[in-house]
Image: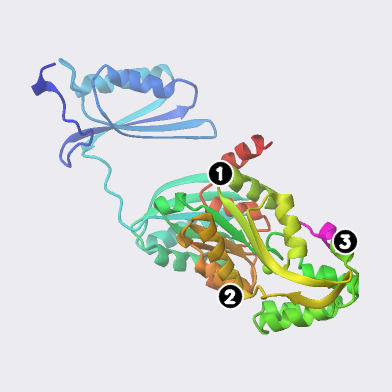
Amino acid sequence: MSASQIPPATAVPGEDDPTLLVKIFGKDRPGITAGLFDTLAAYDVRVVDIEQVVTRGRIVLCALVTPPTAAGVTEGDLRATVHSWADSLRLQAEIISGRGDNRPRGLGRSHVTVLGHPLTARSTAAIAARITGTGGNIDRIFRLAKYPVTAVEFEVSGAETSNLRTALATEAAALGVDVAVVSSGLQRRAQRLVVMDVDSTLIQDEVIELFAAHAGCEAEVAEVTARAMRGELDFEQSLHARVALLAGMDESVVEKVRAEVRLTPGARTLIRTLKRLGYQVGVVSGGFTQVTDDLKERLGLDFASANTLEVVDGKLTGRVVGDVVDRAGKARLLRGFAAEAGVPLSQTVAIGDGANDLDMLNAAGLGVAFNAKPVVRRAAHTAVNVPFLDTVLYLLGITREEVVAAETHAD
Ligand SMILES: [Mg+2]
């Protein structure tokens, strides 16, 4: 081949250059992709784009290629050869002549993750219509997971992420599905620190209520907790009021409470997968270090911070030691953990359910309201309303297959 015959270095055809879209559909079996490109190789075509999906054993393979350049062959020859190869394998082939590459994707790219339990056709239709309504185009759809919920991701271009988030939040609430909208790009891949609330997020319990049950003041404490979580009471005052009810209890109650704590379904899976993928994971709690230190140890967490119940002569004094971890304190701790981990705040994820998590959820790059009170759900970037903590992984674009792989490789 002389220098003048060497094709240009770029594989991207110009807008007006002819291209062929070759689409193969049929029963999947090994060797189809190799077979198609082997067939095309005889015509010296260049590959511009390839997309392939297999759904329930049926393959759709699309190849965008340049017209044949081999000496003495025509596009008609290529068509005949591809059809004959497809017929021999009982596949359907369609070859569409056109010009140029794919249309450039619009600016404003987002990932829309939909968690359905179950995912219905009605919900899918409504979400797709809303995406279109905000000027967005759905470029790609694929399933992230079928367990414990059906999680599907839409790649959308041409719509502002914030507009999409607002429009879909309304739709999600009406449909009873969870929809998360995050901006695409490298930042999504670079998220490296996840910080969780503890009570009613990492665990199913409110730790103060477990203590209260042993002290016989469950009802009084539960009432104060509920009012604080609804944002009706200042958290610090309510904490002091509740802890005061525990004064005089024997320190041995701590061990009993630790044993009673119930992890939220999916908590272990979430943490194990994040750790395997190189994330750092921490907890911040308006509860107590007497419990969170134990959780940190048991779950292999990188960070944990909470209030400390004061113990004197083997008895709870009814006071906490030092600064109280409240709403502002949780956000401050998130910043501290991020600094320590060397991760910018924009690459952090915070998960929580209560009003005292709001500052932390807003400070994080992605704030996830987990089975949260309405006031928290409305303010967070996204909400999960199924009771499985590992579904947060899907919001980060992590697939069930990756979750299972992390499980298989666990020590
Ligand atoms: Mg909580």
Q: Nearer the viewer, mark 2 or mark 1?
A: 2
Residue found 83% across the figure and 71% down from its top: 311
- Within-10-Å neighbours for mark 2: few <14, some 14–19, many 20+: some
Q: Is residue 376 among what the camera can see?
A: no
Above or below — where is 283 with respect to 26?
below
Q: Quadrant of the N terminus?
A: top left
Residue closest to the eye, 335 or 368: 335
Left or right: residue 262 versus residue 37 is right
Left or right: residue 24 versus residue 390 is left
In magenta segment, residue 57? no
Q: Distance between the residues labelled 2 and 1?
A: 30 Å
Q: In which quarter of the image is residue 278?
A: top right
Q: Distance between the residues labelled 3 and 2?
A: 30 Å
Q: Where is residue 108 in the image (x, y as percent from the top left)?
A: 34, 58
* Mark number displayed over residue 328: 2
Q: Is mark 2 on a helix, strand or loop?
A: helix
Residue under label 1, please give it: 277
Q: In which quarter of the image is the C terminus?
A: top right
Contact flag, marks 2 and 1 (Cβ < 8 Å): no
Left or right: residue 208 versus residue 93 is right
Residues shaded magenta: 255-265
Sequence-earlier tag: 3 or 1: 3
Residue under label 3, please give it: 256
* Mark number displayed over residue 381: none
Residue found 56% across the figure and 70% down from its top: 332
Residue found 21% across the figure and 22% down from its top: 76
Left or right: residue 240 versus residue 379 is right
Amino acid under disc 1: Leu
Q: What element carries label 3?
A: helix
Above or below — where is 265 with respect to 231?
above
